[in-house]
Amino acid sequence: MKKSTIVVMAILAVASVLILLPFMSYNGLVEKQENVKEKWGQVMNVYQRRADLIPNLVSTVKGAANFESETLTEIAEARAQLGQVKISENTFKDPEALEAYLKNQDRLSGALGRLMMQTENYPELRATQGFRDLQAQLEGTENRIAVERKRYNEAVKAYNTAVRKLPAALFAGLLGFEKVPYYEGEKNMNIERAPTVDFGKN
């Protein structure tokens, strides 16, 4: 084989790799970005489930005589504020929007925690089947929230790592793939703590 033919073949092989590299990187990044979106959607789903439980919880607790209405008002206001924050499947890309969303979730978590601690003073409330059912649902939801936040952060780690690693790092910015923020509870410690749902023994 002629030397010139070998050189041409080598050049074509290198050119092919350089042409295919961005496409391969793009496809891998798309897959990881979609995984982050899916996990973020699950985080929103479990938060929505918690928000959906609140009207029933508040209604059940209101039945207890002389219950601290201030706490119920705070819960209602915190839940209403959640509806005012515009969120979407892409909220996770915007650190400010993500922080606002999580701050409101933090406020709701704190209010629910105070509510649950106060219910210990109402044995007749703790004895009702409806309240016990809501307690179990709330506990389950808080566990789901923790699990989905962890899965979201794992997906973010995989995506952010892919964006920064070669060869994708050479093309990621040009193709519109930027790092996304983690769900960082330590910025707002209460969001990492599920509301206290220990009602003591009847």
Image (cartoon, rainbow, N blue to C red):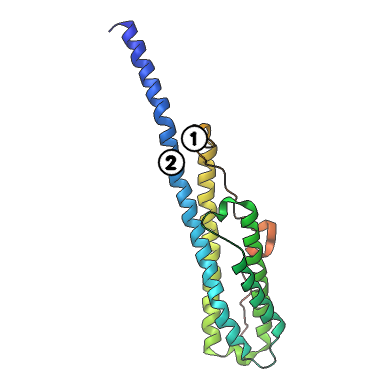
Q: Amino acid at mark 2?
A: Gly
44, above or below 137, in the image: above
Give residue 99's position: percent from left, percent from top.
Answer: 65, 57
Residue assigned mark 2: 28
Give residue 157's position: percent from left, percent from top.
Answer: 54, 47
Q: Which circle marks residue 107 in the picture?
A: none
57, above or below 9, in the image: below
Q: Amino acid at mark 1?
A: Ala
Q: Is residue 7 left or right of residue 29?
A: left
Q: Quadrant of residue 106?
A: bottom right
Residue assigned mark 1: 168
Question: 22 or 153: which is nearer to us?
Answer: 22
What residue is drawn where x is 63% and y is 88%? 62
> Going by the picture, which residue comes out furthest to the left?
1
Verify CB contact (< 8 Å) between mark 2 and mark 1.
yes
Give residue 194's position: percent from left, percent from top.
Answer: 61, 69
Q: Quadrant of the N terminus?
A: top left
Q: Quadrant of the C terminus?
A: bottom right
Q: CA distance from mark 2 to mark 1?
A: 9 Å
